[in-house]
Amino acid sequence: MTKRWKMATGAILGVALLAGTGAAVVAAGDQGPGGPGGMMGRRGGPGGIVPGLRGLDLTDAQREQVKATMDAHKATFDAQRDKLVAAHKALNEAVTAGTFDEATVRQKAADLAAVEADGAVLRAKVHSEVWALLTPEQQTKAKALLTERAERAGQMRERFEARRDQRGRRGERTPRPQGD
């Protein structure tokens, strides 16, 4: 009876994990590319296109030019986000389908990859347009801010891994001594 119970519990946990993963994928898709703020940053500005843009002391004219550039691409960003959400949803449906169909999952994953590639090209295009509006000093400062952000992300990743390793060691059991 315990073997059956373990199998049932494992199956239930597996389904719950899969459902949770699917919900996370759909939620991430609903947020759009780049997280909660989408491609345009957390507050709807272009901070997601050129990281640290708010800290670059843009002139009023530069702000207007950046806004005009972002507004010119808004419809394209919106369409890209909608395609991304649909591709995530289609992949999630293929992954959580009642029967496993490897070809369908691979096709939906490839479709999602193509949509993500289109999004990367769009972001690169707009980034280059916004980048051209910056002075050389602002570009240098933006690069420095990006380097700082990458270093902080690396430090956070190291702290996370260290905590994960500590938790793993706490959960380890020491082997029982064998009887003589």
Image (spheres, helix red, strand yellow):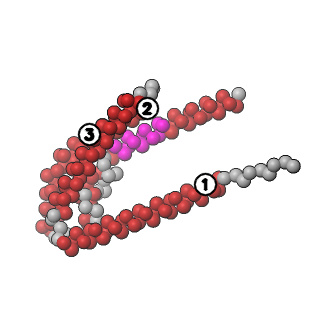
Q: Residue at x 15, y 65 (%)?
A: 133
Q: Which residue is mark 2?
A: 96
Q: Which residue is mark 3?
A: 83
Do the CB atoms of the residues marked 1 and 3 lie less than 8 Å apart?
A: no
What number is the disc on residue 168? 1
**Hey, what amino acid is under mark 1?**
Gly
Question: In the current view of this chain or complex, which residue is farthest to the front?
Answer: 180
Residue 43 at x, y = what percent? 28, 57
Do the CB atoms of the residues marked 2 and 1 lie less than 8 Å apart?
A: no
User: For numbered disc 3, what is the local secondary structure?
Assistant: helix
Q: Toward the viewer: 15 or 180?
A: 180
**Hey, what amino acid is under mark 3?**
Lys
- The CA span between labels 3 and 2 is 20 Å
Disc with the residue nearer the chain's start (3 vs 2):
3
Q: Residues within 10 Å of mark 1 (few under 14, many from 20)?
A: few
Q: Residue at x 21, y 42 (%)?
A: 79
The magenta segment: 18-29
Residue 18 at x, y = what percent? 48, 37
Instruction: Tell me if 109 is positioned left or right of 9 in this view.
Output: left
The answer to whether one can see residue 45 in this image is: no
The answer to which quarter of the image holds residue 88 is top left
User: For numbered disc 1, what is the local secondary structure?
Assistant: helix
Q: Main secondary structure of the magenta part?
A: helix
User: For numbered disc 2, what is the local secondary structure?
Assistant: loop
Q: Toward the viewer: 15 or 178?
A: 178
Disc with the residue nearer the chain's start (1 vs 3):
3
The answer to which quarter of the image holds residue 138 is bottom left
- The CA span between labels 2 and 1 is 30 Å
Q: Toward the viewer: 3 or 12?
A: 3
Question: In the current view of this chain or complex, which residue is farthest to the top?
Answer: 99
Vertical arrangement, residue 36 with respect to residue 23, above or below = below
Instruction: Tell me if 171 is positioned left or right of 164 in this view.
Output: right
